[in-house]
Image (cartoon, helix red, strand yellow):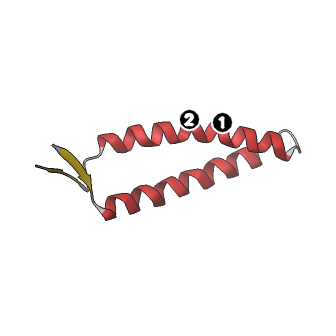
Amino acid sequence: MTIIETKIRTTYKAISWRMLAVINSWAILSLSLTDSNLLNAIYMNITGFFVFYVFERIWSKINYGRYNEE
C-alpha cells in the first residue's frame, strides 16, 4: 500500500511552511540581541529546524489530500 499526496496538499504545505519560515526569521531578527549576521543566521537555522520538525509532525496527522493507492 502506497500513500499518495495530491498536488493541492503539497501546495498548502509549501505555502504554510514559507509563512512559518518568514515568521521565524522575523522573530529572530526582531528579538536579536546581537548585530552579528552570522549569529542571526545560526539562530534562524536552529529555530527553523525545530519549527520544521513540529510542522511536519502536525502535517503527518492531517489526512487532507492523501489517499491510499492499492
* Residue at the spot 67% in from the left edge and 50% down from the top edge: 25
**Label 2 vs label 1: CA separation?**
7 Å
State the image coordinates of residue 33 (x, y, percent, origin top left).
84, 38
Relative to 37, residue 46 above or below? above
Question: Is residue 52 shown left or right of residue 8?
Answer: right
Question: Is residue 42 shown left or right of residue 66?
Answer: right
Other-residue count near label 2 (Cα within 10 Å), few / some / many at <14 / 14–19 / ≥20: few
Identify the residue at the far right of this view: 35
Q: Amino acid at mark 2?
A: Phe
The number of numbered badges drawn on the structure is: 2
The residue labelled by disc 2 is 50
In the depicted view, which residue is nearer to us: 14 or 31? 14
Q: Amino acid at mark 1?
A: Ile
* Residue at the spot 26% in from the left edge and 56% down from the top edge: 65
In the depicted view, which residue is nearer to us: 29 or 66? 66
User: Which element is circle 1 on?
Assistant: helix
Instruction: Please say if the residues under marks 2 and 1 sit with CB atoms less than 8 Å apart.
Output: yes
State the image coordinates of residue 16 (x, y, percent, origin top left).
47, 56
Question: Which disc number belongs to residue 46?
Answer: 1
State the image coordinates of residue 27 (x, y, percent, origin top left).
68, 47
